Image (cartoon, grey):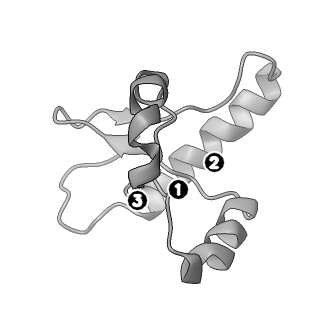
Amino acid sequence: MGSLKSMARVLGPKGLMPNQKSGTLCKADDLIETIKQSKQGLIEYRVNDNSFIMNKIGKRGFTDENLKINLESLLNTIVKRKPETVKGRLL
């Protein structure tokens, strides 16, 4: 990570700076497991202070059908992983 300090001004604003929280930086021991999860379609999403869920569901070149499939997959994952302590309903 120390060797990336000089590149931080370039990578940071583009959102390319690796970090452990987002899963883009891992230890050598965990590398194989991280790659397996990535290939299996790991879904990552973030929640901001106002409880808005932030996630990308596709790219510009995706068809409407592909975007719909990705959105449904994200929503199903969020519903399955809803903590017991969260009150109310999703969707």
Three-letter amino acid code of the residue under disc 2: Ser
Q: Which mark is residue 73?
A: 2
| Amino acid beneath label 3 | Gln
The Cα–Cα distance between marks 2 and 3, rounded to whole angstroms, is: 24 Å
- x 23%, y 37%: residue: 51
> Helix, strand, or loop for circle 2?
helix
- Per the image, the residue denoted by label 1 is 77
Name above or below for residue 61 compared with residue 3. above
Q: Position of residue 23 (x, y in %)?
A: 49, 58
Contact? badges 2 and 1 (CB < 8 Å): yes
x, y percent for residue 83? 28, 65
Residue type, label 1: Thr
Nearer the observer, 39 or 28: 28
Image quadrant occupied by the C terminus: top left
**SS at mark 1 in the image:** helix
Does residue 84 lie above or below 5 as drawn? below
Residue at mark 3: 20
Residue occupying the far bottom of the picture: 29
Seen from the viewer's position, the closer of residues 15 and 63 is: 15
Q: Residue at x 37, y 43 (%)?
A: 46
**Front-most of residues 68 and 53:** 53
- Residue 52 found in image quarter: top left
